[in-house]
Image (cartoon, coloured by chain):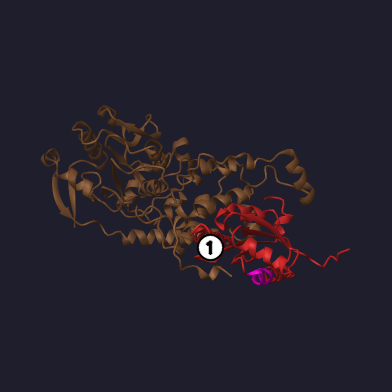
Chain colours: A brown, B red
Amino acid sequence: MTKVLTINQSVEMGIREFLKFLLDKSKVKGVFTLKKLNKGGDVAYSLITRSDELKDTVPFFPLMPINAGKLLSRFTMNGATSEPVAVVLKPCELRAFIELVKLEQGFLENIMFISATCGGVYPLNMVHDGTIDKNLSQYWTAIKKEEIPPNLRPACKACTEFIPYNTDMTINLVGNKTLDSQCEIFIESKKGEELAKDKDIKKKYSEKESKKKNLDNFRGKREAEKKKIFDEITPKLTGMDGLINIFGKCIGCHGCSKVCPICYCKLCEFESSDSEYGPSHYESELRRRGAVRVPPNTLYYHLGRLSHIAISCVGCGSCEDVCPVDIPLSIIFKKIGESVQHMFEYIPGKSITEKIPLTTFKEKELTEIEK
Amino acid sequence: MKKDDDFMPKILTFLCNWCSYAGADLAGTSRLKYPTSIIPIRVMCSSRVDPLFILKGYLNGADGVLLTGCHPGDCHYQSGNYHTRRRFAVLKKIFENLGLEHERLRLSWISASEGQKYAKITTEFTQKIKELGKNSTGTEIFL
């Protein structure tokens, strides 16, 4: 049983009203959430301190412009925020932020996390071509029925970590039939409980105990979808020829690493002068190979990125979303990432105390790989 | 002149300064014979070897990559080789999952007193790579 605050409004209105209340009563000094830019589907993450700016916020809009974990690390990089901030984000974004905190790229203190059971998000191009609005009602109908809405990001369709970890408050979206009339906020942490104890909150919102919905059925559907998607890519993702077929069309924009929440290095090896090909380099390559791809080192870049971040990949799907040549990056990274994470029974972002496997070790392990 | 079928692989070998390099040195001073396939690179610790180094070697046509370091527990920097082991295991897993030839990568612990072992491992590994043949990445164009 978990404590629940109930607001008798639709989830969208309810959470907005709750955030406004937190700001007005100075429970938090800032709110970080998605905000509409215009009447179309364009949204962007915003940090808001003036409560009248909350009116266009859409906290659970099914879109992820940039992984919020990456954004949070931008303003907590040098230390915790001086004032408390409420942050509304998706489970994978929260997991990404936890990974970044472990990589010393951010601070958790003074942040109140509000997350939800996540139904997935649409690819960004559905905003650009304006189809996202038409899909919204279908999205929420599917979510209420615990189904996977069509046209989602592939990574979202195959995501089995849709229940947030390390959150202070959770809102049940998946399988919640009363989305349009009631907003239930589950209190998940001490921080959340302390806030719920507050007299202003007690006065305003009713509190009860309630059980969280069992989502095994939904998980089953996602597992099946994941298996299907993985099975599709496995035969293509085999051997040097397969890899060249998949990655050969890469134009080298490095967009995937720019949006990746885990790729945090300011000075990326692949953008350093070490990775620059001068004319003399082409000459020597040509002497050896007889022909050379221009620009070269595509495979080195992608496999290199895999070797660096697979262990922490949260599978948010941002990389694939920005790829201009539609390389199925998110599925590749998710598949390889899971296999590597499985070696150490590690789920990125699940626990703040569990160290990232590559930063720690056991004295007796993995003896089978040393010869 | 070498015959064409007399394939001598190129094996990129990372040697840690404190154990394996001394081990290789001992093999030399003890006049032990080991293959000319080895291209040695001295690093201060096996954990200095970023998986990218191995990857770059592999994609540039190295027929094999051998990573060597102190035995677990003997690292000059206390725990470097434990980290190496995890990183190497991860890289190897990635290779396996992508259907790349993970047999071309090898991790071995060679101490400063193990000249014999160094000669044995390099001979063994060279033999294995000879069986695998040339690494096709050396002539691949669309890398």
Q: Nearer the viewer, residue A144 or A352?
A: A352
Q: Position of residue A288 (x, y in %)?
A: 78, 51
Inspect this view and state whether residue B66 appears. no
Q: Nearer the viewer, residue A311 or A24?
A: A311
A116 left or right of A310? left
Q: Which residues are magenta?
A: B114-121
Relative to residue A352, is residue A238 depicted above or below? below
Asked if the magenta segment contains residue A67, the reply would be no
Task: Find residue A48 and report its image quarter.
Answer: top left
A25 left or right of A175? left
Relative to residue B2, is residue B44 depicted above or below? above
Inspect this view and state whether residue A367 appears. yes
Q: What subunit carries mark 1? A: B
Q: Nearer the viewer, residue A229 or A75?
A: A75
Q: Position of residue A322 (x, y in %)?
A: 51, 41
In which quadrant will I find the C terminus of chain A?
bottom right
B18 left or right of A21? right
Q: Nearer the viewer, residue A107 or A261?
A: A107
- Determine whether the residue tagged by mark 1 lies in a helix, strand or loop: helix
B100 left or right of A356? right
Q: Position of residue A324 (x, y in %)?
A: 56, 41
Q: Position of residue B95 (x, y in %)?
A: 58, 61
- Taking the spot 77% from the left edge, 46% from the top edge, the residue there is A284
Relative to residue B4, is residue A201 depicted above or below? above
Please give the residue where the numbered disc 1 appears in the rendered image.
B89
Looking at the magenta stretch, what is its main secondary structure? helix
Amino acid tagged 1? Ala
- Taking the spot 64% from the left edge, 55% from the top edge, the residue there is B42
In which quadrant will I find the N terminus of chain A?
bottom left
